[in-house]
Image (spheres, rainbow, N blue to C red):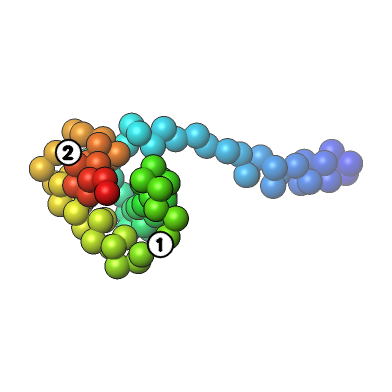
Amino acid sequence: MISLTFAISIAPIVANAQLTIDMAKITCEQYLAMPSSQSDKFSAWMSGWFSYQNDRPFVDLALHQRNIASVKAWCQYHPAESVMYGLQKAVGTN
């Protein structure tokens, strides 16, 4: 009984194991193949990273949607390139 109680108490810890993903290695092909829920999260992360890199401390949701569309359009023609490279090419820096 004590073993069962211990096993049940540590189960949530095991379930919340961390996963590390090198975002710079995600290709356009992988990005375009993501289900929309995963793509939305990845796009939000991408947008935050790009804003940080370009010293933009604001969120413009319309710009965010246009940038996603630009990156996805660029990725259609460059499936082997990284999404981070595509972001720089499709959106550029200000």
Q: Foreground: 66 or 35?
A: 66
Say which mark, if any, is on residue 8.
none
Outermost residue toward the right in this view: 2
Figure quadrant of residue 67? bottom left
**Residue found at x 89% / y 41%:** 2
Judging by the rendered image, the residue that carries numbered circle 1 is 59
Q: Are marks 1 and 2 in contact (CB under 8 Å)?
A: no
**Residue found at x 15% / y 47%:** 74
Q: Position of residue 65 (x, y in %)?
A: 28, 63
Q: Where, quadrant-wise, is the N terminus in this rendering? A: top right
Confirm whether residue 24 shows in the render: yes
**Residue found at x 40% / y 62%:** 59
Task: Say above or below: 66 vs 11.
Answer: below
Q: Position of residue 42 (x, y in %)?
A: 38, 49
Mark 1 vs mark 2, CA separation in Å:
28 Å
Figure quadrant of residue 29? top left
Q: Amino acid at mark 2?
A: Pro
Q: Secondary structure at mark 1?
A: loop
Indicate left or right for 52 with 70 as reference. right
Judging by the rendered image, the residue that carries numbered circle 2 is 79
**Residue found at x 42% / y 60%:** 58
Q: Secondary structure at mark 2?
A: loop
Q: Position of residue 32 (x, y in %)?
A: 24, 48
Outermost residue toward the left in this view: 77
